[in-house]
Image (spheres, rainbow, N blue to C red):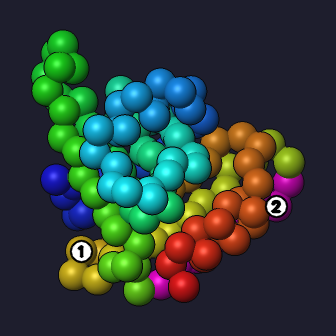
Amino acid sequence: MIDFSKDALFVLEPFDFKTALKRVTPMLIEGEEVFATFCFARDYVIFTTKRVIIIKERGTTGLKKDYTSLPYIKVKAFSVETAGEPGLDCELDLWFSGLGKIRFEFKGTFDILGFNKMIGEYIL
């Protein structure tokens, strides 16, 4: 499980959609679809139509994994910060009831406003 007091910031880069889909398909519920996949260090963040799934690899081999599911139904507020200039980082903050805030920083060029619209469709 994510320690929200320590692991509240994830600096993300795009990750291969097909590879990410293989990692989470066994845990998806009926009607749930993956729409965005990212990585940070050895770990992954996968946005679905129902939740955010964070996969943290543990140990030296990475065979042990921690899967954390953060359902959108528990999001109480969210915000985005645009990059301001092309090529700069942009951010998405999600506040989860009973857990706290988690920040996703997207490296490089990224359509944060379009992503905000997609997330809004599932949260609101």
For the point 23% across and 64% down, the residue is 5
Residue 30 figure quarter: bottom left
Q: Nearer the viewer, residue 13 or 123?
A: 123
Magenta range is: 77-85
For the point 69% across and 71% down, the residue is 117
Side of 36 relative to 65 (left or right): right
Marks 1/2: CA–CA distance: 30 Å
Q: Is residue 7 visible to the viewer in this orientation of the structure? A: yes
Q: Nearer the viewer, residue 80 or 19?
A: 19
Q: Which one is earlier in the sequence, the residue at label 1 or at label 2? A: 2
Q: Secondary structure at mark 1?
A: loop
Residue lying at the far front of the rendered structure: 30
Vertical arrangement, residue 102 with respect to residue 21, above or below = below
| Residue 99, label in figure | 1
Vertical arrangement, residue 62 with respect to residue 112, above or below = above
Query: Residue 20: horizontal and vertical position, in percent?
Result: 45, 32
Residue 79 is one of the magenta-drawn residues: yes
| Residue 65, label in figure | none
Query: Residue 18: horizontal and vertical position, in percent?
Result: 53, 27
For the point 37% across and 79% down, the residue is 73
Q: Residues within 10 Å of mark 2 (few under 14, many from 20)?
A: few
Residue 37 is one of the magenta-drawn residues: no
Query: Residue 108: horizontal and vertical position, in percent?
Result: 72, 40
Q: Quadrant of the C terminus?
A: bottom right
Residue carrying label 2: 84
Q: Secondary structure at mark 2?
A: loop
